[in-house]
Image (cartoon, rainbow, N blue to C red):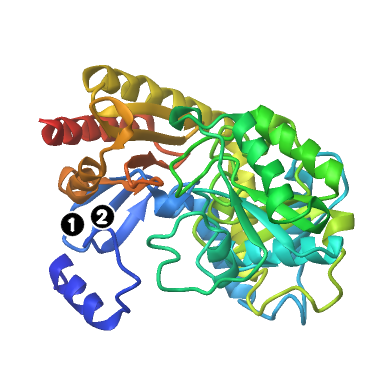
Amino acid sequence: MSTNAKLQERKLSAFARGQGNVYPVYVERARNAEVWDVEGNRYIDLGTGIAVCNTGHAHPKVVAAVSEQMARFSHTCVMVNPYEVAVELAERLNAAAPGDSAKKALFVTTGAEAVENCIKIARAHTGRRGVIAFNGGFHGRTNLAMGLTGKVAPYKQHFGPFPADLYHVPFPNAYHGISIEQSLSAIETLFKVDIAPGDVAAIIIEPVQGEGGFYLAPPAFLQALRALCDRHGIVLICDEIQTGFARTGRMFYSEYAGVEPDLITMAKGIAGGVPIAAVVGKAEVMDAAPPGGLGGTYGGSPLGCAAALAVLDIIAEEKLVERAAAIGEQFQRRLMALQQRYSHLIGEVRNAGAMIAIELVQNGLASQPNTALTQAIIANASKHGLILLACGFYGNVIRFLPPLTIEDAVLEEGLSKFEGLFAELAG
C-alpha cells in the first residue's frame, strides 16, 4: 500500500529539486472542495490547485465533456486540422471579454505562454520594444515571463540573464503606503529616465496581484492606466490568469474599473483543471501577428476546449459570479472577527469576491511582516485537514481560493478549522 511518506521519498528521488511540493500529501481522489489522500485522510481544499478548479474537483459536467471529447478524438493540432469546439470556445471567450470592441482569441497551453504571446502581439502591433510591469507582479516561469515578474526569490534567482527592455514600477498599495499618484509618477519618471513612451509596446498588470499578495489595483488606477496607454499608443495587457472566470465576483476583475484592456491573458480557472490558456483581445491588435507567428502544438487542445465550454456553462447555470461574492462575504465576516482577536498579528483582511487574503504582521505593523507565522500555518495546515497557500512580496500572506461551488457547510467547516489552526499557532 502506498503511503504519503513512501511516495514523498520516491518523488524526491525522481523529481528535479526545483519542482518542490507544499505538502507531502498525495491525492487519491477529490470531489468539489474535498480531497482524500492515499491514506484516506480528508482535507478541505482552500487552494484549488492555485485557483484552477473554480468549478470544484471533478465537476460532473466537466468530466462528461472531457470523456465525450476523448471518445471522439484527443488531438489533431488546431493549426493543422481545427475543430468546432475550438471555434465555439473562441466565440464565447470573445463575447465574455470586457468592452464593446470586436475581439479575437488565441489558444496556447499555459499562462506563461499566454503572457509571452501578449508581448509578441503588442510588439508586432506597435513596432516598439519596451514593456512595463509592476513590482510584486507574477507572470510565469518562462524566460520572458520571469523577466516581467517583479519578485526575485524564488522565481528569478539563478536564472538570468533576462530579455532586455523590461521595466518595473511600484504597484499602488495603500496598506504599504504606495498611492495611485506615486505609481503613476514612477511611470512618468521612467519615461524621462529609461525609455520614451514612444518606445513602449505594452504595460502589463495583474488587476489583483496573485503571488504578490492579493493586492487589488484600485479602479481609478486601472482607469488612469487606460488613459495613459491611449495617450501614448501603448497596449494595455491585463493578466487575468488568477482573477478570471468568476473568481473575483466578476467574470474578469477589470470589469470593476469599467476598462477595456487591449489584451487579456486567461488560464487557470478556464477549464476546471484541464490544461489550456488563451489570449483574447481587440481584433485589430490580435491580427498584428502574421499567419504562423502564433501557436503551439497543444494550443487549443480539444480536451481543454471541451472542458472550458463546460466551465462556461457551469458558471452561468450555477451563478458562480454571484456565488463568488457571497463566499467572499462569508470569509470577510469570519476573518474580520479573527482579526479583532489577533490585531497584533493580522494586519489586513482583503478580498475581491472569492480571492481572499490575510496579511500577517508583528505588533500590528505593516512594516513588520510575520513570515515565520505564515510558514508555520502552511506547514501545519494538513494536520488540521486543510489545504492552504501562502504568497506575498514578503511571504507573509495566507491566500484563500476555495472552489466557487463549495457547499456552505464545508465552507463553514473549513473556516472553523482555520480558526483553530490560527489560535493554536498564535498562542
When the figure is inspected, residue 127 is found, relative to residue 32, above or below; the finding is below
The residue drawn where x is 65% and y is 80% is 297
Q: CA distance from mark 1 to mark 2?
A: 6 Å
Say which amino acid is labelled 1: Gly
Residue 345 in picture, x, y percent from top left: 24, 28
Could you tell whether 99 is left or right of 335 in the image? right
The residue drawn where x is 73% and y is 49% is 191
Residue 300 in picture, x, y percent from top left: 67, 68
Q: Residues within 10 Å of mark 1 (few under 14, many from 20)?
A: few
Could you tell whether 270 is left or right of 392 in the image? right
Task: Quickly name the residue at label 2.
Answer: 36
When the figure is inspected, residue 200 is found, relative to residue 289, above or below; the finding is above
Residue 73 in picture, x, y percent from top left: 63, 77
**Residue 238 appears in view:** no
Residue placed most toward the observer, 293 or 160? 160
In the rendered structure, are the residues bearing label 1 and label 2 in contact, judged by CB atoms less than 8 Å apart? yes
Could you tell whether 266 is left or right of 138 in the image? right
Residue placed most toward the observer, 159 or 192? 192
Task: Quickly name the residue at label 1.
Answer: 40
* Quadrant that contains the N terminus: bottom left
Residue 277 in picture, x, y percent from top left: 62, 61
